[in-house]
Image (spheres, grey):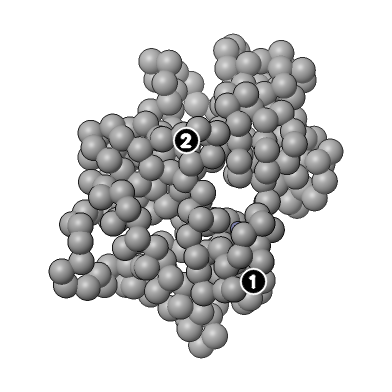
Amino acid sequence: MRTARAEIALPTPQTRADGLNTLAEVTERLLSQVNYVRHIVVSCGGLVRKDGTVEKSLYTPFSGVNLASFFQDQFKIGALVRNDAHLQFLGLPVGRGTFVLLTWGTGIGGAFGHNGWPAEGHSNFAGEFGHSLKGSSTKCCACGSRGCLDLTASGRALDANLGQNWYDRLTDMNVAERLKQVGCELASVQTLLGRLFDPRCLCLTGRIFGIAQVRMALNNRPAGDWPRYRSIFCLDSWALIRRGAIRLVDSAEGIL
Ligand SMILES: [Zn+2]
């Protein structure tokens, strides 16, 4: 098996056409590095149907686009298109049992499942934790709900509140105070997910989980908190296709 990697530093595409052009450019670079590609696996944030249609994606310009058809038309390659957190779940170092994944980035997402496979739900939309759990805001969210966790604890919310380079100013008083609040919100979410799913392991991925005050809030579980599960911080995990299925590889954590 060969691994090819292509990264292109471009401004975030604002229009659907820009987004598809960027996708085509990245794909061309990847394909130029390998001789034969049978399928391509594509992850996209938001509500992604099994046929590859992105029903709604708040932070990408692909709402309403069938990405599987795009790759078929442009590159004559079959594409498996899935929600980004569902694919990340397949890359977790999990074994048997129930696992929950909470992902933090531009938005907050997640997945849950059993024995390494994510539960997809009837519409393939399961696990949208950022838009199903509540945060401290009472504002309306672009998803149509009110008070979503995404409005206060996501990367986009922190960028809007603290400025885009807040990660370089962790010791500034306003940044530290905001991160403490976000840590408390995520700690409540951790408890809620633990009690909802009773997982063997709760996996947290995203840059914010590397920040000391956030980790402290998450590790500071009250005595007698139930159920008892292990939280792991997967800051770097990736998926590989093996034996026809996408399975995990994680150098830091190993197989659980
Ligand atoms: Zn929402």
Q: Is residue 256 above or below residue 132?
A: above
The image quadrant of residue 7 is top right
Whether the residue under disc 2 has CB within 8 Å of ligand 1: no
Q: Position of residue 112 (x, y in %)?
A: 38, 42
Q: Secondary structure at mark 1?
A: loop
Residue placed most toward the observer, 215 or 224: 224
Identify the amino acid type marked 2: Gly
Residue placed most toward the observer, 193 or 95: 193
Residue 240 horizontal side relative to residue 164, left or right? left
Quadrant position of ligand 1: bottom right
Residue placed most toward the observer, 252 or 40: 40
Residue underneath mark 1 = 139
Is residue 42 among what the camera can see?
no
Rendered-image quadrant of the N terminus = top left
Q: Is residue 187 above or below residue 64?
A: below
Residue at position x 37%, y 31% in the image: 117
Identify the amino acid type marked 1: Lys
Q: Position of residue 197 (x, y in %)?
A: 31, 49
Residue at position x 35%, y 38% in the image: 113
Residue underneath mark 2 = 121
Residue placed most toward the observer, 103 or 124: 124
